[in-house]
Image (tube, rainbow, N blue to C red):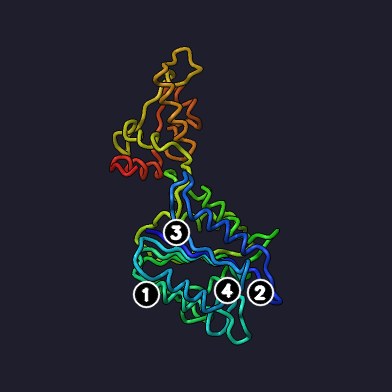
């Protein structure tokens, strides 16, 4: 039971945007299904492609999103954002001078009051970093109830940039959901997404903002794992404890005259684990030399984590 509201507005009179509708379609398609084709979120896509969406209509959709009971709700918005002395707002196409759209504080209040387990709000709009600061522009206080996560394209005093008809932030978000932010099991969480986008944007670019109050990160999408999960499960076969060393010798290296076919198969798995940072050779720079010089390999700190998951049958 997971639902997502995906919103993209381009058609603002006098201040049109160009990439928000396309961005919304991309995000909706990614949230609907995991990479293996299994269903993920029930997505409601709202754009002003064919008709103007009013403030009242959007408010109703957002209210519905955070109502009821389900495991996770995601709100994605791409469009104009603005900020005033009373705080930030997402702008609707029917905006007027004194009624620009829906206040970020109003959306935050709906999320904070919701009984849903996980509420994730992703905003690609200018000044979006003000979301979560209920006292307005002058305050940096963040007030989130349990289960609320906020990921925004820019700080509260920054613009959110479009390049070649696509938001910079959403372009990176798409890459992250496609597997760029996946862990070794294939889970893409909000924390991993933020880390991916934060590293991709340079110091002179707009800066993403991440705010959360969760006891654990839930997966937003399942992507293809960077390593076969069965190889991760074999960690407990190769290492009986997290401090164990796995002793190597030349029989593991396929170019060695003394190679052993079974050991060569194991060595290939170990090398794949090295490639994703789960193990490292001991006292040698490369696994080849660790084998040829009868050294060993050991788990890294990341390896400890996946060893424990394998031990507990969680992967």
Task: Nearest to the eye among marks 3 and 2: give it.
Answer: 3
- SS for tag 2? loop
Q: Earlier in the sequence, mark 3 or mark 1?
A: 3
Comparing 88 with 302, the one in front is 88
**Residue at mark 1:** 113
Task: Nearest to the eye among marks 1 and 2: give it.
Answer: 2
**Residue at mark 2:** 12
> Badge 4 local density, few (<14 within 10 Å), some, or many (20+)?
some
Q: What residue appears at the point 45 percent right and 32 percent down from the top-left corner?
A: 283
Q: State whether residue 78 appears in this view.
A: no
Cα separation, mark 1 vs mark 2, equals: 31 Å
Q: What residue appears at the point 40 percent right and 59 percent down from the top-left corner?
A: 2
Q: State whether residue 82 appears in this view.
A: yes
Cα separation, mark 3 vs mark 4, equals: 21 Å
Marks 4 and 2 close (CB-CB < 8 Å): no
Cα separation, mark 1 vs mark 4, equals: 25 Å
- SS for tag 1? helix
Q: Position of residue 86 (x, y in %)?
A: 53, 84
Task: Nearest to the eye among marks 4 and 2: give it.
Answer: 4
The quarter of the image holding the N terminus is: bottom left
Q: Which mark is residue 42?
A: 3
> Badge 3 local density, few (<14 within 10 Å), some, or many (20+)?
some
User: Which residue of the protein is positioned furthest toward the front in this rendering?
Assistant: 50
Q: Earlier in the sequence, mark 4 or mark 2?
A: 2
**Residue at mark 4:** 53
Q: What residue appears at the point 45 percent right and 57 percent down from the top-left corner?
A: 191
**Where is 104 relative to 300, above or below?**
below
Q: Please state if 302 lies on the left or on the right of 122 as rendered.
A: left
User: Which residue of the protein is positioned furthest toward the top in this rendering?
Assistant: 257
Q: What residue appears at the point 46 percent right and 38 percent down from the top-left corner?
A: 227
């Amino acid at each position: 039971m997971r639902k997502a509201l995906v919103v993209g507005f381009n058609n603002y009179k006098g201040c049109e945007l160009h990439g928000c509708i396309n961005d919304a379609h991309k995000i909706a398609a990614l949230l609907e299904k995991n990479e293996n084709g299994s269903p993920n979120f029930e997505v409601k896509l709202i754009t002003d492609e064919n008709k103007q969406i009013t403030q009242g209509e959007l408010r109703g959709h957002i209210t519905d999103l955070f109502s009821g009971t389900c495991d996770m709700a995601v709100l994605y918005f791409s469009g104009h954002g603005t900020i005033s002395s009373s705080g930030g707002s997402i702008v609707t196409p029917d905006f007027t001078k004194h009624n620009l759209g829906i206040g970020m504080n109003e959306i935050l209040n709906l999320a904070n009051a919701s009984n849903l387990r996980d509420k994730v709000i992703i905003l690609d709009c200018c000044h979006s970093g003000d979301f979560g600061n209920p006292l307005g522009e002058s305050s940096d206080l963040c007030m989130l109830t349990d289960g609320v996560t906020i990921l925004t394209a820019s700080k509260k005093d920054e613009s959110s940039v479009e390049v070649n008809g696509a938001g910079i932030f959403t372009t990176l978000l798409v890459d992250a959901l496609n597997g760029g932010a996946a862990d070794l099991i294939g889970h893409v969480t909000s924390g991993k997404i933020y880390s991916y986008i934060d590293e991709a944007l340079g110091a002179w670019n707009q800066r993403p903002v991440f705010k959360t109050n969760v006891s654990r990160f839930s997966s937003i999408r399942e992507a293809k794992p960077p390593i076969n999960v069965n190889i991760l499960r074999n960690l407990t076969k190769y290492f009986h404890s997290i401090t164990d060393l796995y002793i190597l010798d030349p029989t593991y290296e396929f170019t060695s005259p003394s190679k052993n076919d079974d050991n060569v198969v194991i060595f290939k798995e170990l090398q794949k684990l090295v490639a994703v940072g789960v193990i490292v050779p001991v006292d040698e720079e490369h696994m080849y030399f660790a084998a040829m010089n009868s050294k060993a390999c050991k788990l890294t700190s990341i390896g400890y984590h996946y060893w424990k998951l394998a031990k507990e049958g969680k992967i």
